[in-house]
Image (cartoon, helix red, strand yellow):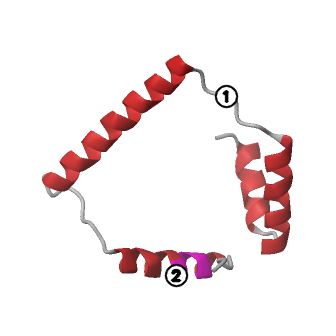
Amino acid sequence: MSVTIEQIKQEIRSLAPADVDHLLRDLQQEYVMPSVDDEDAASVEAEWDAEIDRRVQEIEEGKVELISGADFQRQTDALFAELGIKRQA
């Protein structure tokens, strides 16, 4: 990533949560993701299938450690608190 993008990201991190929310809504309205044609969709699907297979293999080989949903929630809550982001219920 360019230095400019990193600078923008750093500035966004310094905004109040309400300002970040406003910025994200503006960006969503202004920019639209390009549509995916059937050929691209098939390619993306194939890549996701390969990624899923790779992740399952890592689990079966014990290369990754699974965590419970409750642990994930606690870790996510802690990260959001650390970043000063209020989560919606």
What is the crowding at mark 1: few (fewer than 14 residues within 10 Å), some, or many (at least 20)?
A: few
Which stretch appears magenta? Answer: 77-81
Vertical position of residue 57 compared to residue 84: above or below: above
For the point 50% across and 74% down, which residue is it?
Answer: 76
Q: Name the spot of residue 79 as percent of width and height, x first.
A: 54, 76
Write down the residue under mark 2.
78
In 3D space, how far apart are the residues under numbered discs 2 and 1 (Cα atoms)? 36 Å
For the point 68% across and 79% down, which residue is it?
Answer: 86
Q: Which residue extends farthest top?
A: 39
Q: Name the spot of residue 23 as percent of width and height, x first.
A: 84, 58
| Disc number for residue 35 | 1
Q: Quadrant of the C terminus?
A: bottom right
Q: Which residue extends farthest left?
A: 61
Task: Please indicate, yes or no, whether residue 77 appears anywhere in the rendered image.
Answer: yes
Task: Please indicate, yes or no, whether residue 16 appears anywhere in the rendered image.
Answer: no
For the point 77% across and 61% down, which residue is it?
Answer: 12
Identify residue type, mark 2: Ala
Would you say the magenta stretch is mainly helix, strand or loop? helix
Q: Nearer the viewer, residue 56 or 19?
A: 56
